[in-house]
Image (cartoon, rainbow, N blue to C red):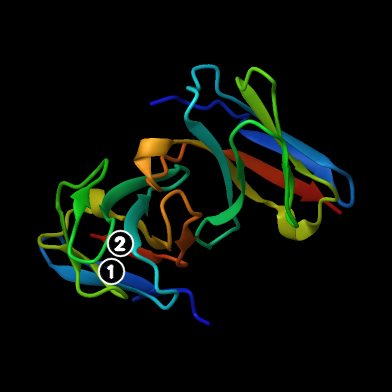
Amino acid sequence: NAGVTQTPKFQVLKTGQSMTLQCAQDMNHNSMYWYRQDPGMGLRLIYYSASEGTTDKGEVPNGYNVSRLNKREFSLRLESAAPSQTSVYFCASSGQWMAPLHFGNGTRLTVT
Amino acid sequence: DAKTTQPNSMESNEEEPVHLPCNHSTISGTDYIHWYRQLPSQGPEYVIHGLTSNVNNRMASLAIAEDRKSSTLILHRATLRDAAVYYCILLYNNAGNMLTFGGGTRLMVKP
């Protein structure tokens, strides 16, 4: 049982390049989330999807787009990467309202 | 949103109990108290949560003050594997699972 799987694990981009971070969960969870964590800081919510077919902005959505491809997959896209987006990105999922979140192990992104 | 205050860091000896405090003086009646921890180079991991009563599970215990303005996460016997950043998070009922993480407490466990 893999839980929440994120790809890639590491990525280096140049300013202005685009990329998509992939996330998949195998727990049949309804809700999925994208967080970022800057060095020495707590996590901040970027976007979330309460259920398949819906997405909403979190605390720091600027510069990102998301797609809830199906119940299993939730991707995060950076259209034009900036150095300020250097961070570790975590995907999470949860099955029910108020249920605990299950996190992936993160994608470490560096934008030069 | 109600905020939490935690010490930046704490130290413990292996196999001794650890009490991690959290102040949340502006908590409202519908806020749940959640605890997560983050081991080095990993995503956060759920530990425990509660509303009013003390809670126990296989990982830890959560002691909630009678006025709910503070809570304490209790690890009964710390191991080296418990070295992590522990986050105390308030989750109000209407927010579903949208956690807001603060800085947390970095727990160091000495052999």
- Distance Cα–Cα, label 2 vs label 1: 5 Å
x, y (%) of residue B76? 84, 47
Name the residue rendered at 42%, 44% in the picture. B99
Query: Badge 1: how crowded within 10 Å, few (<14), some, or many (20+)?
Result: few
* Image quarter (top left, top right, bottom left or bottom right) of the C terminus of chain A: bottom left
Residue B27 or residue A58, whichever sits in front: B27
Looking at the picture, which amino acid does disc 2 mark?
Answer: Thr
Horizontally, residue A77 falls left or right of residue B55, namely left
x, y (%) of residue A28? 40, 74
Residue furthest to the right in view is B15
Kind of element beneath mark 2: strand
Horizontally, residue B41 falls left or right of residue A15, namely right
Query: Badge 2: how crowded within 10 Å, few (<14), some, or many (20+)?
Result: some
Kind of element beneath mark 1: strand
Residue carrying label 1 = A12
Mark closer to the chain start, 2 or 1: 1
Looking at the picture, which amino acid does disc 1 mark?
Answer: Val
CB-based contact (under 8 Å), mark 2 and mark 1: yes
x, y (%) of residue A66? 18, 62
Q: Do the dots labelled 2 and 1 sit on one chain? A: yes
Name the residue rendered at 40%, 48% in the picture. B97
Name the residue rendered at 46%, 25% in the picture. B3
Q: With respect to residue A1, does B4 lie above or below? A: above
Query: What is the chain identity of the residue bearing mark 2?
Result: A
Find residue A110 and name its label: 2
Query: What is the chain identity of the residue bearing mark 1?
Result: A
Residue A28 or residue B59, whichever sits in front: A28
Query: In the figure, residue B53 lies in which quadrant?
Result: top right
Query: In the figure, residue B5 lies in which quadrant?
Result: top right
